[in-house]
Image (cartoon, rainbow, N blue to C red):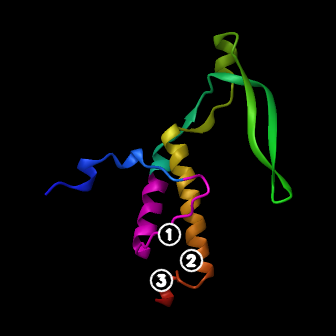
Amino acid sequence: MQKVEDSINLLDYEYAPDQVVTVDLKGHHILGVMQVLDAIVKDNTHTVFLNGYQSQATPKFVDFEGNQKLDKVDVTWEGYPNANSFFNQVPTEGLSVLGAHALDLLTVFKGVQKSLIDQGVAKKQTQL
């Protein structure tokens, strides 16, 4: 028997940006996804030297329910003029692109978990 995944590319199907989807998941699956995403974030967080330095930053704000919220920051980067200036920088913590996507999803799942705690659906282990 052919699996659905083999007959169509599931990633070719998308949702409208404002589409809300309800999915029935067992609670341990939510925790499992959160644990996997947390491990990906940790495995993709490294101490790095940046390839350049930030010479200018311009924040962009959007109106969100009557409040100004930071939408993005346009950053202009400049390369270091020489090896000495490159190696004099302070190393910083950085995430890979995969780690950043995992962190984004983890934040969503943490919000779901917090909502379920507030509703009394998720309980401390001592309360089960």
The residue labelled by disc 1 is: 22
Query: Which circle, 1 or 3, is nearer the viewer?
Result: 1
Q: Nearer the viewer, residue 100 or 39?
A: 100
Query: Which residue: 47% across, 55% down?
Result: 37
Q: Nearer the viewer, residue 61 or 43?
A: 61
Q: Is residue 96 magenta?
A: no
To which quarter of the image does residue 35 belong?
Answer: bottom left
Q: Is residue 26 magenta?
A: yes
Quadrant the N terminus occupies: bottom left
Q: Position of residue 51 (x, y in %)?
A: 62, 22
- Cβ atoms at labels 2 and 3 below 8 Å apart: no
3D distance between C-alphas at marks 1 and 2 = 14 Å
Query: In the figure, is residue 88 to the left or right of 21?
Result: right
The residue labelled by disc 2 is: 116
Look at the image and give the residue range highlighted in magenta: 16-39
3D distance between C-alphas at marks 1 and 3 = 26 Å
Query: Which circle, 2 or 3, is nearer the viewer?
Result: 2
Q: Position of residue 42 (x, y in %)?
A: 49, 49
Task: Say which element carries label 1.
Answer: loop
User: Badge 1, how many Cα within 10 Å: few under 14, some, many 20+?
Assistant: few
The residue labelled by disc 3 is: 125
Type of the residue with mark 1: Thr
